[in-house]
Image (cartoon, rainbow, N blue to C red):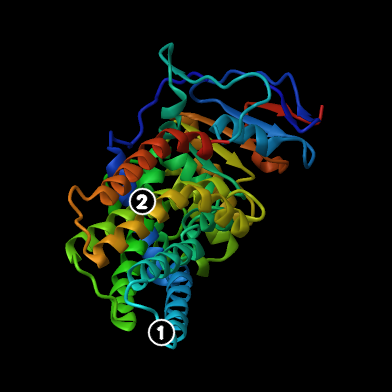
């Protein structure tokens, strides 16, 4: 894949294949295209050349269905400020075609330590709590592909530990792609692509 | 990417279920922020009061009233709608929730959800403004059934037209000006039809076949079908 913005080259000749249990790290200077690469994988941005293919048992997964199989956390992805945390999760369950299971939502919120704050408005969350709830949103449908753009952003040491646990859990049954320059986060990866090179 | 486990908790759902989820979420947010409804109602009420005071002081002949009143009513409704209906998409862009919605819902479901929300706002607007206009202006209507059908069908068309334009302009920089500029040519045929229909309902001309209502319904159907095909192209980058 390669990506240009107007005539500016962001990255070129990026090619990789991932399978279950693998964790890919993406590093690079600010503006090197880490977040853009994740957005391309998620289908939010089109690459200038090349493509992303997903398959299950050699059967390609159509682009329109991919959203079911991926969860994403990124600083630019916001949740609804005027809803409570639990209302946000209810919405994402329903809009993804899941029946709303309050217990399931609370279980995932418990994993990131937000159970007590489930009925708080999202706008009243601290930046670290917001990041934790974004993780819950990405994990709600138990996606096989987890895209984490700076997952430790605004998190304290307990929060970083949660990210580590989530990555370890995901390694057992799915794929994780982490874009970050934090050594601790990139250390979870089996392979690292440096976009600055 | 290849994986051994591609099973998620997502089930097969209909576009309608997803659209209803988006509709209810937008309603819940609107009840808490009252951003769009305040903008629409403030514009509608102030314009209605200004019109009723200024026109009331002139002597308008009986013959001109049906046409002039229909024009004034639709100017109030259309411009009130233009003052707030773009919010359905613009607020997603401003709040940074557009991408999370892109990752969660199918484009057609998003369009339908936003359409339902805009139609709810328009329904509330018409429920308040049309009876108030009739009372304040002493608007005499010979065929109330035809008048009601005209305002409902043209209101639905207005909602469909403004929803697709709101989606187009959401990511632009000069959203406000662009929304009005793009909406006006799209809504112009509907406005003319609605004015003609309301005039006929007031005058008492034979509404046999209800041609204006049929045109407004045809406009609505064309607009929804076109939008459902067009919207995924606008929604994706």
Mark in the foreground, 2 or 1: 1
For the residue pair A65 and B154, the one nearer the viewer reads as B154
Percent x, y of residue B49: 43, 83
Disc sitting over residue B157 in the figure: 2
Q: Percent position (x, y) of residue A19?
A: 51, 20
Q: Please say if B101 is above or below A131.
A: above
How many callouts does the rendering have?
A: 2
Which chain hosts label 1?
B
Q: Which mark is residue B59?
A: 1
Along the line of sight, the residue nearer the viewer: B77 or A10: B77
Q: Residues within 10 Å of mark 1 (few under 14, many from 20)?
A: few
Q: Chain of mark 2?
A: B
For label 1, the SS is loop
The residues tagged by marks 2 and 1 sit, at their Cα atoms, a distance apart of 33 Å
Question: Closer to the camera, B187 or B25?
Answer: B187
Residue at position x 44%, y 86% from top? B53
Choose the circle earlier in sequence order: 2 or 1: 1
At a point 44% along the width and 82% down the height, the residue shown is B55
Say what secondary structure mark 2 lies in.
helix
Q: Quadrant of residue A2?
A: top right
Q: Position of residue A84 (x, y in %)?
A: 41, 64
Discs 2 and 1 carry the same chain letter: yes
A28 relative position to B180: left or right: right
Question: Residue A151 at what x, y percent from top left?
Answer: 60, 46
Residue found 23% across the figure and 70% down from its top: B141
């Amino acid at each position: 894949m390669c990506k240009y913005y107007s005539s500016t080259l962001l990255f070129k000749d990026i090619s990789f294949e991932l399978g279950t249990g693998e964790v890919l790290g993406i590093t690079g200077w600010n503006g090197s295209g880490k977040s853009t690469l994740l957005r391309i994988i998620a289908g939010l941005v089109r690459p200038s050349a090349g493509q992303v293919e997903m398959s299950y048992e050699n059967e390609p997964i159509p682009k329109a269905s991919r959203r079911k199989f991926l969860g994403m956390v990124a600083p630019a992805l916001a949740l609804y400020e005027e809803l409570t945390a639990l209302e946000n999760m209810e919405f994402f369950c329903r809009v993804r075609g899941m029946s709303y299971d309050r217990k399931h939502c609370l279980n995932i919120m418990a994993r990131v330590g937000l159970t007590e704050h489930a009925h708080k408005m999202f706008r009243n969350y601290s930046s670290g709590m917001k990041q934790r709830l974004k993780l819950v949103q990405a994990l709600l449908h138990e996606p096989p592909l987890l895209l984490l753009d700076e997952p430790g952003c605004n998190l304290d040491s307990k929060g970083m530990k949660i990210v580590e646990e989530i990555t370890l859990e995901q390694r057992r049954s799915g794929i994780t792609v982490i874009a970050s320059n934090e050594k601790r986060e990139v250390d979870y990866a089996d392979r690292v692509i440096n976009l600055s090179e | 990417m290849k994986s051994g486990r591609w099973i998620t908790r997502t089930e097969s759902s209909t576009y309608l279920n997803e659209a209803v989820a988006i509709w209810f979420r937008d309603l819940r947010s609107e009840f808490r922020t009252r951003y769009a409804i305040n903008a629409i109602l403030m514009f509608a009420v102030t314009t209605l009061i200004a019109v009723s005071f200024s026109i009331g002081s002139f002597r308008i002949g009986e013959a001109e009233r049906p046409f002039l009143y229909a024009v004034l009513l639709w100017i109030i409704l259309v411009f009130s709608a233009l003052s707030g209906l773009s919010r359905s998409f613009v607020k997603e862009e401003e709040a940074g929730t557009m991408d999370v919605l892109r990752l969660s819902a199918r484009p057609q479901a998003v369009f339908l959800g936003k359409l339902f929300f805009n139609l709810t706002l328009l329904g509330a607007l018409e429920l308040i403004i049309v009876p108030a206009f009739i009372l304040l202006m002493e608007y005499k209507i010979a065929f109330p059934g035809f008048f009601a059908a005209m305002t409902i069908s043209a209101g639905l068309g207005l909602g469909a037209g403004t929803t697709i334009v709101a989606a187009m302009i959401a990511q632009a920089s000069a959203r406000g000006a662009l929304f009005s500029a793009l909406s006006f040519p799209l809504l112009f045929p509907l406005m003319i039809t609605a004015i003609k229909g309301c005039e006929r309902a007031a005058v008492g001309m034979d509404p046999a076949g209800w041609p204006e209502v049929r045109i407004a319904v045809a406009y609505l159907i064309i607009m929804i079908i076109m939008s459902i095909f067009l919207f995924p192209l606008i929604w994706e980058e």
